[in-house]
Amino acid sequence: MKVTGFISLWTLVSLPCAQLVNPAEHEDVVKHAIKLHRGKGAVIAQRKQWVLESCRKLSGLLRQKNVVLNKLKNAIRAVEKDAGLSDEEKLFQVHTFEIFQKELNESENSVFQAIHGLQRALQGDYKDVVNMKESSRQRLEALREAAIKEEMEYVELLAAEKHQVEALKNMQHQNKSLSMLDEILEDVRKAADRLEEEIEEHAFDDNKSVRGVNFEAVLRVEEDEANSKRNASKREVEDDLGLSMLIDSQNNQYILTKPRDSTIPRADHHFIKDIVTIGMLSLPCGWLCTTIGLPTMFGYIICGVLLGPSGLNSIKSIVQVETLGEFGVFFTLFLVGLEFSPERLRKVWKISLQGPCYMTVLMIAFGLLWGHLLQIRPTQSVFISTCLSLSSTPLVSRFLAGSVRGDKEGDIDYSSVLLGMLVMQDVQLGLFIAVMPTLIQAGVSTYSSIFKEILRILILIGQILFSLAAVFLLCLVIKTYLIGPYYRKLHAESKGNKEILILGITAFIFLMLTITELLDVSMELGCFLAGALISSQGHMVSEEIMSCIEPIRDFLAIIFFASIGLHVFPTFVIYELTVLLFLTLSVVIMKFVLAVLVLSLILPKTSQYIKWIVSAGLAQVSEFSFVLGSRARRAGIISREVYLLILSVTTLSLLLAPALWRAAIMKCVPRPERRSST
């Protein structure tokens, strides 16, 4: 039987090869096959003997397994009938027997799954890569499920071991008299066990069957230490605290967000080290930029470049640093709103609404035109154009910080127009984020569904406009009835103690942030409106709150600009410097020209001179293009190369922004106001 199978297998292998040779060579092939077969006869006999012995062993193991299963069933029935055991003890012993039954069945299933996999591999075509890929995927899924089952069984065994230890302790306590302290400690131990059971969420068991949840293989990595003994001791501690790092097959790194045991306080020491390092290195980088005449924010970006993946790669908690940096944006926009009163907003609301909309439409039109010439997909052209049309609100607010913005009779203040247009761009950002899922689907849709996609986009725009109307209506109610009494109460309670005032203002910022987020409008707009509402209480109120919030804003802004530097790659910029400079200058000039054109149409004749300053403030690209670009890259809208180009162009445009701003200020602003603006 074995020899016949070998000859058949050799025939299957030799048949395609025989078709490739001449008929005269067939006899040589057959002789060679017979020679090989005769030379390996002893080996075939040994293999046959090994197969027979293995089959006998496997058959014996399966019979033994059936005998053991019958004994386990009898043992379970005996335990259930034993009147001397408590219900809890019966449940524990039965559960222990069931765990052993499961172990036997899983071991048997593993053997036959391996045989089935071998059979499927032999039946497959070795030239079919797709078939082999599917087989590999099935084996990977089976291994993942087996790992999950093994993990669950291990946890059950740990619980059984714990139960045995507790039972042994109970027997020892029953055999000896307990002191009062021992009884108290025993009660505390039982209460602690109940507490752990109450607060444990069983997140693994609750989520493993949820739709969209996949089993993944991960690596657990401990922090390297020079001292091996210290490393060993630290590893034991981290095993208990769960502070090691997990890495999945896609090289994503994970840290602990919520521990199983919430009674033990924990701290992410990686995150602490990252913040400390950024704080220390930001000082010399900021000093350097101040010395050469650049804004300090570029020093903070350089700090992020030096510490990020393109530099020393010492930042471990990149996501956490970026999250903390977002609070810098929130407080920056709050202070912008604090300096931007609702009266000024009413004065320039038409310009603020029309200007960004016209600029975005023109940018998209130019993008589609160039995309058609360069044969770029329309969805990609629309995304890139919209992304580049946005400008940096935190950067411009730094330019305007402390400037004198007194209006002349009949004139419009350039800072009011500029900030109003930037706020509208923040609204557009929220709208674009909401439309992105539809844009992703449009990239793979057929022409028959274009009408549906356009209808969905119009519905989304209607929802955003409704949300904006609700937000501004709510702001009107807060300004009329709530903000005055609320601030007076805070001011009265914070006499001699600024803590209550800072906490109250921060809570109000987060409240407005949450409201705008719930209404599907950008959180940044909520922060700006919070500042504008408080500024309506008067100049003295704004000055007092600004003196309290500015230090918090400055520290968080350092983290924010450093997090931008984490995504700047100098080597890529150096390799493609000529192309990137050309693209950056093209984008900056195009945005400047479009802004001048739009403002020439919508500004009053008496205020035409401010169009150069406002256009200079809008000529750079917003740092939020990093966020939009990363989302688009994950969604497949843009490629990796386009993503890196967007990052580099954004960075270079931000570096050019101070020079363009100063040139506009020198040209258009009167000399007394120029000193305060620069």
Image (cartoon, rainbow, N blue to C red):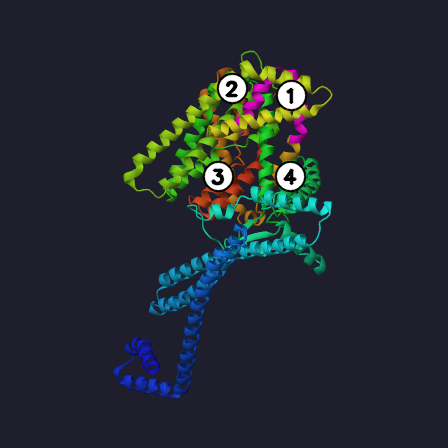
Look at mark 2 in the image and give the residue it sits on: 475
Point out the frontmost of discs 2 and 1.
2
Magenta range is: 524-552
Q: Earlier in the sequence, mark 4 or mark 2?
A: 4
Q: Is residue 519 magenta?
A: no
Residue in view at x 54 percent, y 32 percent: 392
Residue 99 position, x and y percent, is 49, 58
Mark 2–mark 1 contact, CB under 8 Å? no
Q: Crowding at label 2, few (<14), some or many (≥20) Cα neighbours within 10 Å? A: some
Look at mark 1 in the image and give the residue it sits on: 671
Query: Above or below — where is 553 with respect to 245?
Result: above
Asked whether 28 or 361 is in front, the reply is: 28
Asked whether 401 or 101 is in front, the reply is: 101
Q: Earlier in the sequence, mark 2 or mark 1?
A: 2
Q: Mark 4 belongs to which amino acid?
A: Tyr
Q: Earlier in the sequence, mark 3 or mark 4?
A: 4
Residue 662 position, x and y percent, is 61, 29
Query: Above or below — where is 247 with respect to 195?
Result: below
Q: Secondary structure at mark 1?
A: helix
| Residue 436 figure quarter | top left
Image mark for residue 628: 3
User: Magenta stretch mostly in which secondary structure?
Assistant: helix
Asked whether 626 or 69 is in front, the reply is: 69
Q: Quick one: quadrant of the N terminus?
A: bottom left
Q: Crowding at label 1, few (<14), some or many (≥20) Cα neighbours within 10 Å? A: few
